[in-house]
Amino acid sequence: MIGALYERAIMVPRALRIALASPAAIAGTAAVFLLFAAFYAMLLPATDTGGAIGLISLRFLTPGEFILALLMALLLALTLALGVHGFRNGSKAKPGGSVLGAVVAVLPALLCCSPILPLSIAAIAAVLPAAGALGVPIQGFIATHEAWIYGVAIALMVWGLYGNAQRALHCELARFRSRSAQKGELSRLVPASAPVCDACEPAQKHDAADERVSGERQTFGRLV
Amino acid sequence: MKKKPAAKCTLRNLSVAVLMVAMAAATAWASPTGKMGPMNAPPPHNELAPDAPFLVHGNKVYLQSLKGQPIMVWQVTTWCPSCRAGLETLAQHKSLIDNSKLKIIVLRDYKNGGYPGDDMEKFAEDVAPALLHDPHFVFGEDTETLFKLYNPRHYIDVYQLIAPNGQVAVRSSTPSATFDKIEHFIKTKAGP
């Protein structure tokens, strides 16, 4: 159990080592990280400013929010690096986790204390009067469960990072197998019947193939 | 089995990047930078502040009884982070307020806006205990009448600055982000 978890967790640094192999990838990821860090550093304290984002919200940034901003920015930047690497290698991506996490992370700042929700609910209530009572309870819930919401956001981002790492490794493997096949080395490493682009599919759909892929990954890991 | 070259796999990873950047941009664009909502509401023209009662320690007090002095009617909920930050901001500017004629009436929204939370006294004691005994501050509760008159849209953090002649000079929200308006009001209409 722990071994399996470790095996899964170790995928992320392995995939990142491949995705961030070039100085350009490192520079791009660092730039994205700084951009998102600045964005989150201004966004997270917006609960204190009624949703106003910018230098004004930066004044209310607490050390805890600053750490949270760095963590979220790091997760998004790394996921993006893996996504770009996967795209270059023709991988399929599942953006769900990271995007959902990023969306969840903006909820407290924008909905708890800003006029967005009252105005939206008022607009909906003009058509559907029963909806008029929803605004404040939603705002209240968001405001009083801020920490939980950020926790869920980070969990979703981690899930997104893991998913992208998994796909990046699978696709790297597919690319490696393609190259090997071209050089006639494939038969030595991989059974001839193995589908080359299978690795680009989400791993969950290929449980049966996982054991085989895992063995190949070890070979591949030694090669890279 | 038929081989599919890796290059033929879809471009979905690019959509992740585009989606994330678009989302960040959309969030920044859609966020209330003060152009929407009551934060930058236009100044009311010749609008007299209506009279309405509020509760202080269970006793009814009418706004009319404060006519002739500049007042700020600030309606808050005790669970809202911006209200907490707003009270902290006012506490930071205590000396400016104490040297003016401004009276700040901090009222908990009627039924706390519809979501449970601390009572007003505990809220003030937690956030800015020094203001509890400051004569420039009054902490109390909204009545339904005052809530309907002064906060018909049920904002959780909204205030009106009322000049000594009873006219509403400023309608805004979130003192933490708009203290410059309060400061300007103090300098122009509530000076010592």
Image (spheres, coloured by chain):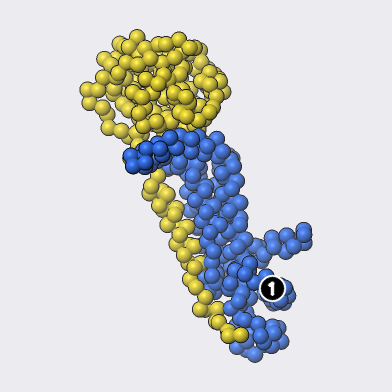
Chain colours: A blue, B yellow
Label 1 crowd bin: few (<14), some (14–19), many (20+), radius 10 Å: few
Using the image as rendered, state which of residue B57 and residue B162 is in the foreground: B57
Q: Quadrant of residue A145?
A: top right
Q: Image quadrant for the N terminus of chain A?
A: bottom right
Image spot of residue B143 (x, y percent): 41, 19
Residue beneath the point at 62% across and 72% down? A170
Using the image as rendered, state which of residue B116 and residue A1 is in the foreground: B116
Of all chains, the one bearing label 1 is A
Residue A122 visible in the displayed image: yes
Residue B141 shown left or right of residue A223 in the figure: left
Image spot of residue A128 (x, y percent): 37, 41
Q: Amino acid at mark 1?
A: Ala
Vertical arrangement, residue A6 with respect to residue B94, above or below: below
Image spot of residue A58 (x, y percent): 47, 40
Residue beneath the point at 77% across and 58% down? A2
Vertical arrangement, residue B172 with respect to residue A175, above or below: above
Total numbered circles: 1
Image spot of residue A172 (x, y percent): 61, 74
Q: Image quadrant for the C terminus of chain A?
A: bottom right
Callout 1: SS: helix
Q: Which residue is mark 1?
A: A208
